[in-house]
Image (tube, grey):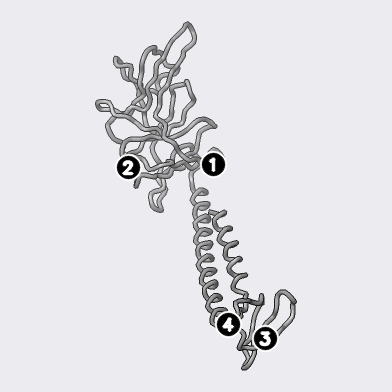
Amino acid sequence: MLRRAISILCLTAVFAAAADRLYLKDGDYQLMREYQVQPDRVRYYSTERSDWEEIPLELVDLERTKKEATEQQAIAKEANKVVEEENAAIKAERKLIQSIPADPGVYYMRGEKLETIKIAEPKINNDTKRTVLRMLAPIPIAGKVTIELDGLTSANKVDGREPEFFFRLSEEQSFGVAKLTLKKDARVVENASVLQVKQDRMVDEKVDIVPTFKKQEGDLLYKIWPEKPLEPGEYALIEYTEGKMMPRIWDFSVK
């Protein structure tokens, strides 16, 4: 937004320079700072020679001079309005960022109200046993497993298809937005294959990560939003370390 504002100001300066022209009826013009119309002549201050000069009124195209000056004043006024609006938006966002709690978590702006998204309670499913994920550390399972959330839809409904979130991490690690799939009475966050070889565990994780934009706004605080409008469905913001199968999850639904 700041770069756009600077571009508008530069454009306004160019137009302002074009407006400081005293046009002549032969198509030529004199660069000037100001002018005065007298009965038979026009007195103007030349910016080229830094002095007052005069020219016969009959040689001056006053209509074109006034018309262009009016047009450029209108453009400058509109450009200033845009700059003021963008500055106000930047100030409002800074105020919003300062209001975000220091506690790790996900925060969603609904209109003018900041909402805290409650962290989800994922479960791990190996088709024979379904257990709360946070109770398992490390995961004593080999084979194909899924990390799931109860229910077919989230209680957290977002407005529109391009939601913006503020994500304060607990530590520097990977994070993003995942597209969830439905399975019976649950939403699947991650599919994984776990191979136990003696004391070592190898995990092949599959998560449907949605392309997003990320902007750091403070210490461990990021703003995150999708690159393209999200299709209706179930999603989650996740904070994770690859190979650990211990993601922190904040689910939401796009309708």
Q: Residues within 10 Å of mark 2 (few under 14, many from 20)?
A: few
Give SS at disc 2: strand
Q: Are marks 3 and 1 in contact (CB under 8 Å)?
A: no
Residue 228 is situated, as x and y percent measured from the top left of the image, at 40, 42
Q: Nearer the viewer, mark 3 or mark 1?
A: 3
The tag earlier along the polypeptide, 4 or 3, is 3
The quarter of the picture where residue 28 lies is bottom right
- The residue that mark 4 highlights is 61
Residue 138 versus residue 188 in the image, above or below = above
Residue found at x 42% / y 11%: 195
How far apart, in angstroms, are the residues tagged by discs 1 and 4? 55 Å
- In depth, the one of 5 and 62 nearer the eye is 62
The quarter of the picture where residue 216 lies is top right
Extreme-front residue of the structure: 26
Q: Residues within 10 Å of mark 3 (few under 14, many from 20)?
A: few
Is 9 placed left or right of 108 in the picture? Answer: right
How far apart, in angstroms, are the residues tagged by discs 3 and 1? 60 Å
Q: Are marks 4 and 3 in contact (CB under 8 Å)?
A: no
Give SS at disc 4: loop
Residue 62 is situated, as x and y percent measured from the top left of the image, at 57, 83
Residue 106 versus residue 53 in the image, above or below = above
How far apart, in angstroms, are the residues tagged by discs 4 and 2? 63 Å
How far apart, in angstroms, are the residues tagged by discs 4 and 3? 11 Å
- Three-letter residue code for mark 3: Ile
How far apart, in angstroms, are the residues tagged by discs 2 and 1? 25 Å
Extreme-top residue of the structure: 198
Rendered image: mark on residue 45: none
- The residue that mark 2 highlights is 157
- The residue that mark 3 highlights is 55
Residue found at x 71% / y 84%: 53
